[in-house]
Image (cartoon, rainbow, N blue to C red):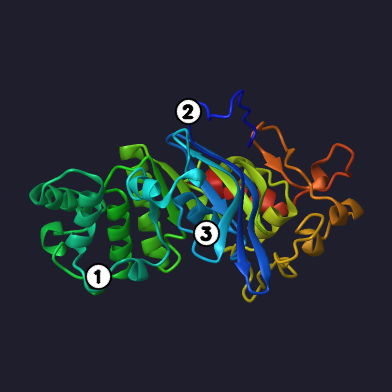
Amino acid sequence: MNGKSFDTNQPAADILLDIRQLETTFFTHVGPVQAVRGIDLVVERGEAVGVVGESGCGKSVMSMSIMGLVANPGKIVGGEIFFNGQDLAKMSDKELRKIRGNKVAMIFQDPMTSLNPVKKIGGQITEVLHLHQNISREDARTRAIELLNLVGIPSPESRLDQYPFEFSGGMRQRVMIAMSLACDPDLLIADEPTTALDVTIQAQILELMRDLRNKINSSIILITHDLGVVANLCDSIRVMYAGKIVEEGKTRDIFYEPRHPYTWGLLNSIPKINVEEKERLIPIDGQPPDLLKPPAGCAFAERCPHAMTICQQQQPPLIKAGEGHEHRAACWLNHAQAEAVAAPLFAAQTQQDKLEGQA
């Protein structure tokens, strides 16, 4: 359980979210696609956790599973999702609606498709308040103004009466954040919140999320394919590949001492500014496995330059890696009897220099 053990079936008091062996499958006409294949994830109160991995690794499906928003033909087929001691996976849709948008809120990737284009911004924010709180129209409007001001939207009184198309992409994302914060959620899930934004606006949104976390003490799950995005916001990182978590640890562990070849590949694929002109990026060779028929062994084995015979035959468990007791990697290279393989210099050193320069 992510380096934590429990004496009972209920999570410890300081644990807000405790996902145990979550499995989510899409039953398509060509067969079941195992999008999430037995994930354990613990989020403490006030903690920010980054979930990273390339497109299709199961990050968004995991978040939709938490929210109870997995659409047909998808279905949660196994596991538990404890939130404040209650198993969300066993709740009815009616019970989930009382929690969704209230105690657990989500910021979606594309605000233009998440906001209603024919409804004013103010009406969309106050709708959330009316749904979950016993509040008058006047108080709801006042609260909406406070929220827009909190996320840095100028002239919030007049902006409430505007439509989404009258806002820039960055401002629409701020509106989405305001809506998600309307009921002071205990857990905020941000699914690729900066993907569609330019670099300057990305930095502003991440700074905003950092400030809001400090103000309201919400726990955050930040889902992204970009390791650089989580460097300054998250306390810990989970690296996902082919529906599984393949490495987990504190943020500094993942950047300073990555112990899974897939994590090395992600770090090495980050564009660098101190390179020679026309120097090529370093991609991860090969393709992810077909989750219609997941491999018997390590899902990364076919792309891994360090793969051994056992990698093809048996799935590696999460093995303690490095000095941190919470740092673990699902790689046979971390087994006590495996031959030592050093991490690439860039992954272990350049990222460390970057973090130290930002400290």
Q: Depth check: 106 or 65 in front?
A: 65
Residue designated by label 1:
164
Between label 3 and label 1, give the one nearer the viewer.
3
Res 225 seen here: no
Disc 2 designates what residue? Answer: 14
Q: Residue furthest left?
A: 138
Q: Residue furthest top?
A: 7
Residue at 63% from the left image edge and 76% from the top image edge: 278
Distance Cα–Cα, label 3 vs label 2: 25 Å
Packing grade of label 2 (10 A; few <14, some 14-19, many >=20) is: few
Marks 3/1: CA distance?
24 Å
**In the rendered image of this protein, does residue 136 appear above or below residue 108?**
above
Disc on the earlier residue, 2 or 1:
2
Q: The residue tagged with tag 2: helix, strand or loop?
A: loop
Residue at x-position 79% and y-position 60%: 295
Say whether disc 3 or disc 2 marks the residue closer to the N-terminus: 2
Looking at the picture, tell me which residue is in the foreground, 248 or 266.
248
Question: Considering the numbered disc 1 on the image, is that residue within a helix, a strand or a loop?
Answer: helix
Q: Mark 2 is on which residue type?
A: Asp
Residue at the image position 11 percent from the left and 47 percent from the top: 136
Q: Nearer the viewer, residue 158 or 101?
A: 101
Q: Which residue is mark 3?
A: 60
Q: In terms of sequence position, does the residue under pointer 3 or pointer 1 come before the other?
A: 3
Q: Position of residue 90 (x, y in %)?
A: 50, 44
x and y percentages locating residue 266 in the rendered image = 65, 59
The reply, left or right, for residue 341 in relation to residue 39 is right
